[in-house]
Amino acid sequence: MPGLLSCPGSLTVICFLSWSLCPSGAQSWTHEVSDVQYGRLDSNVTLACGKSQINTPAVWHLNNSSALPWHQVTSNGSLVLLHVTLSAQGDYSCYDNRGLLLHAVKLRLGHPPGLLSISCRLPNHTYISCSWAESVNTSLPVQYNASFRGTDQEWQPCLMDTVHQNCYVDHPAFWQTIHTLRITATNALGSETTFARFKLDKLLKPDPPESVLVKEVEGHPKKLNISWNFPFSWQRNDAFPLVFHIRYRPHVSLYWSEVYTEESQIVIFDALAGHLHQVQLRARDEVDSESQWSDWTHLLFARPWEDYVTSEPPEDNFLDNFFFTNTETETSTAKTHSPAPQDDGNLGLVILLVLFAVVIIATVLSLICVVWVRQRRREHVTKQELTSVVKMKSMPI
């Protein structure tokens, strides 16, 4: 064996065999694999076989399987995928006629970006926040670049939050007439830039008032006390006052009563006693008349104060004692929760009905008496006439 190894011819043969048996496929895989190739959905995509020669056939696999989407293989070994769909994505590899790996590539499919749908909000004078949504589902990773400027300003970055697809600008220039937001979306298949223009004074929209409370006022069945706090996002100082719009109504009503105030608390005096009420608030910048009203707060429900103690009927109430001795006891418990003004109105109505019934009964009795008297008089006259006739017949002629 030592003699064999020392022979130069033997070393040449061994080196040749070692070179021919070495894993050339692994070497090709290491140096020829492309990271990713991108293609557009619903189009034809061509994948080149890196080591194939002209007129040399190549065999393609998808994810280590010979099953391929609708395709053609050209004379130089390239694979043409026809009208690709998302199912055509994956790892492609091509081999020569000896089964050696020549090339491998990962195919990703999607669309280039389209125009974005942009919306911006200005909850106070010092902060603007913008968000966007894609009009096209690209199915590919997208990068965004946003910038912002006033009419006479240079472009400045809009601080990005790519996870939530929004950006914001601190202290925008309110004195500029028009402001422009520019967002560029880019992926492996292309890019698209969208512009949004607006006026800050018309965009200003506070957040709704917070910590709204509606309480009864003890001893007052027609009052409600409403209090609230300024929005947390609003700078509460004399330079930026807010005006508040309060609306309220009984739960059974279709019409709202409205109040405007700059304070953070009011008392309403015309609540409907004994009824549940709905209350809502919203806010707007008091100085900027072109600004927007905030959204309404959630509906709040409250009932004015009620006197739950029912007083006994007075002993000298003759009509109640005479006509409603039994019914008063039954109805007093049922009306315990009704306010006192409504009880007085019902009692007055009952008295009027009783008086009306008395008048009707008296009239009917009077008519009966008159008819009876007339009938008696007629009977008396008839008896007298008959007596006179009998006497005349009994007299001798």
Image (cartoon, helix red, strand yellow):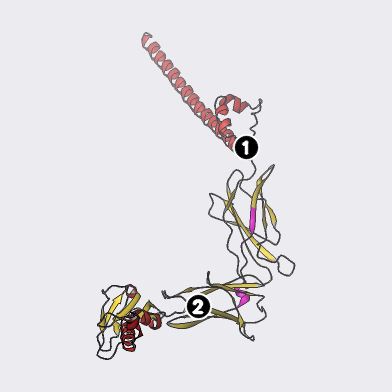
In the rendered image, residue 109, in percent from the top left (x then y), is placed at 37, 77
Name the residue: 26% across, 87% down. 74
In the rendered image, residue 381, in percent from the top left (x then y), is placed at 44, 19
Which quadrant of the structure image shows residue 39? Answer: bottom left
Mark toward the viewer: 1 or 2:
2
Name the residue: 29% across, 90% down. 53
Kind of residue at disc 2: Gln
Kind of residue at disc 1: Asp
Which quadrant of the structure image shows residue 218? Answer: top right
Give the crowd class for mark 1: few <14, some 14-19, many >=20 residues within 10 Å: few
Residue 263 falls inside the magenta stretch:
no
Identify the residue under disc 1.
344
In the rendered image, residue 224, in percent from the top left (x then y), is placed at 66, 49
Of helix, strand and loop, which one carries label 1? helix
What range of the chain is rendered magenta?
Answer: 199-212
- Quadrant containing the N terminus is bottom left
Identify the residue under disc 2.
143
Q: Is residue 283 above or below residue 216?
A: below
Left or right of 74, for residue 325? right
List the single residue furthest toward the bottom: 54
